[in-house]
Amino acid sequence: VGCRKIEEGEVHNESTVEDFAEAAGVSIKFAQSLNDAVGQIQEKFNRTFDISDVYNFRATDDWANGKRYTIYLAEEYVLTVYEENDEVVSIRTSNGEVAYEVNK
């Protein structure tokens, strides 16, 4: 299966955190944080996920505290990922519902 770059910054079906980080041009710390975060949103979608379920990773725009990315999860869900200091702090659905949020 492996990685297939669609265009700069987009990644399709990476199987490991390290491969995802390299293909997406992000740190391993961020890729691991994303893997952990998508692994914790199973209650929202009634199934489990990991980094291999992340498709079309794309940087969108910055927000007040960091960066924002759009991902497709398992080719079914469009989600916005909020990053702060190389860690995922929130994931929201396309209609703005919180799917994951770090407890601060």
Image: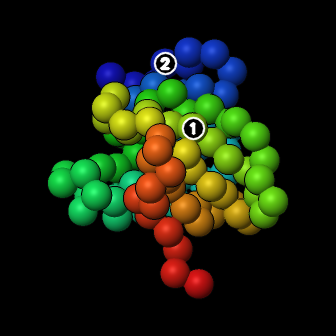
Q: Determine crowd level at label 2: few under 14, some 14-19, many 20+ residues with C-alpha closer than 10 A.
A: some
N-terminal label among 1 and 2 = 2
Which secondary structure, mark 1? strand
Q: Position of residue 88 (x, y in %)?
A: 58, 61
Residue at 52% in and 81% down:
103
> Badge 1 is on which residue?
70
The amino acid type, in three-letter code, at marker 2 is: Arg
- Disc 1/disc 2 C-alpha distance (Å): 17 Å
| Residue identified by numbered label 2 | 4
Mark 1: few, some, or many residues within 10 Å (few <14, many ≥20)? many
List the single residue furthest toward the left.
46
- Residue at 34% across / 49% down in the picture? 50
Residue 45: in sight, yes or no?
A: yes
Does residue 18 appear left or right of residue 83 in this picture? left
Assign the C terminus to one quadrant of the image: bottom right
Percent across and percent down for residue 4 are 49, 18
Give the residue type that dot 1 points to: Thr
Residue 17 visible in the displayed image: no
Locate the N terminus and report the quarter of the image it occupies.
top left
**Secondary structure type for disc 2:** loop
- Whether residues under marks 1 and 2 lie with C-beta atoms below 8 angstroms apart, the answer is no
State the residue at coordinates (59%, 26%): 10
Q: Residue at x 78, y 47 (%)?
A: 62
Which quadrant would residue 55 be assigned to in this image? top left
From this view, report whether residue 37 is shown above or below residue 73: below
Decide which of 64, 37 is in the foreground and name it: 64
**In this image, 47 relative to 86: left or right?**
left
